[in-house]
Amino acid sequence: MSIIISFMLLVCLISCTTARDSSREALQVTIGIGNGYLSKGCNDKHHNLPFKLNCKLPTTPLANEVLKFADQRLALVHPIIQKFKSLITSDPLGITQTWVGSDICSYKGFYCDNPPDNKSAIAVASIDFNGFQLSAPSLDGFLDQLPDIALFHANSNKFSGSLSPNIAKLRYLYELDISNNRFSGPFPDAVLNMPGLTFLDIRFNFFTGSVPSQIFTQNLDALFINNNEFMIHLPDNIVNTHIFYLTLANNKFNGPLPRTIFKAFSSLAEVLLLNDQLTGCIPYEIGLLKEAVVFDAGDNQLTGHLPFSLACMENLEQLNFAGNLLFGAVPEVVCELGKLMNLSLSENYFIHVGPMCRILIERGVLDVRNNCIPDLPFQRSVEECANFFAHPRFCPRMWSYNYIPCYHFPSSSSIPEMAPSP
């Protein structure tokens, strides 16, 4: 009898287990376990299941998780960085995906160092966003809120807006490069109140209006403001400058080349004035640029003769006056410059080149195409040259065009009757 009872209990147990497993399998099929639908059901607020799903919470950091920073200065800039991150509208290279957590020094584009006022502290000292292709409507509230920043490089992005005047409070900032972006508005005057700034690059943007003359007397080594929409005369009241590299090209600078700036810029190594709207004659004072390696004033409306004083620019390697309204003879003393590698005088109205200049033409150093030199190929037509010379052009102080300030003439030589003004 006991054997029969035991057998019946065993059969019942097997039957119940099978039924439960079948029900579970049916339930699994219904809600999609193993078929990729469970997660959808968990996340779908509008599912029609007759019961509540017991879903696991996503494994993301808690909102109130306490971040530990290597230094209090990093803790202070963390919310500033995260706010700026939230304003970025495009990040094709996924740069901001690394801007997570408390290790700010490992964020892509951020570099840490010991600040000058505390060598034991750690702070964000440098930012290099060059080529990141980030888009944001403004840098306000970001750059100007990084108190220990020394270098900020952000060329080739899509940042826009204008620069906050608060950047003047960045006491350590000495290099600022926001070139090739979409900034607009007037020249950022805040930089005039930054005596520690030595490098300023705002080229290839949409800044407009005037450029304050004070910028040329700042303690800058390099000033790049080309390819904007600045429209002013070049300043004529500059006494001294520290600038070595100056690019003003592709703006709307107009008027003549001021005589006084060449003495002030005597230490310049590179001067780019091409494709502006400069007019008038070239003063002999240009020869005071004794350190210049590159001088480019192509594609303007400069006229008159080339001054012999160019012979004083002994370090000159590249000289470009192409695309102007210059005429007369190309001075032989210019063609005798020992380091000259490229002398471009095409698209003018020169009428004569001497033997030394012809040697440079043969070497491919001198380009005088599209001028009015009768015995050379690739010149303007006779009619075009005649039309140009039918309207005489005169330059003041014509005596100065043969004056070479770096030459020491003997008393019997032909020094100009009028001494050159200082």
Image (cartoon, helix red, strand yellow):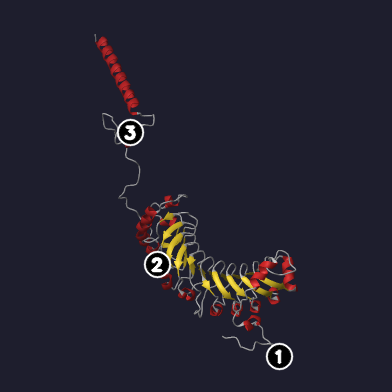
Circle 2: is it few (<14), some (14-19), or many (20+) Cα within 10 Å?
many
Q: Amino acid at mark 1?
A: Ser
The secondary element bearing badge 2 is classed as helix
Instruction: Answer left or right for 183 relative to 345.
Output: left
Calculate the distance from the C-alpha at mark 2 to the C-alpha at mark 1: 59 Å
> Which three-letter amino acid code belongs to the residue tagged 3?
Gly
Quadrant hosting residue 119: bottom left
Compare residues 120 and 81 and report the one nearer the observer: 81
**What residue is pinned by disc 3?**
41
Could you tell me the amino acid type at mark 2?
Answer: Ile
**Disc 2 designates what residue?**
167
Left or right, residue 21 beside residue 319: left
**306 on left or right of 121:** right
Report the mark closest to the observer, 1 or 3: 1
In this rendering, the label closer to the viewer, 2 or 1: 1
Q: Residue furthest top?
A: 1
The residue beneath circle 1 is 412
Label at residue 102: none
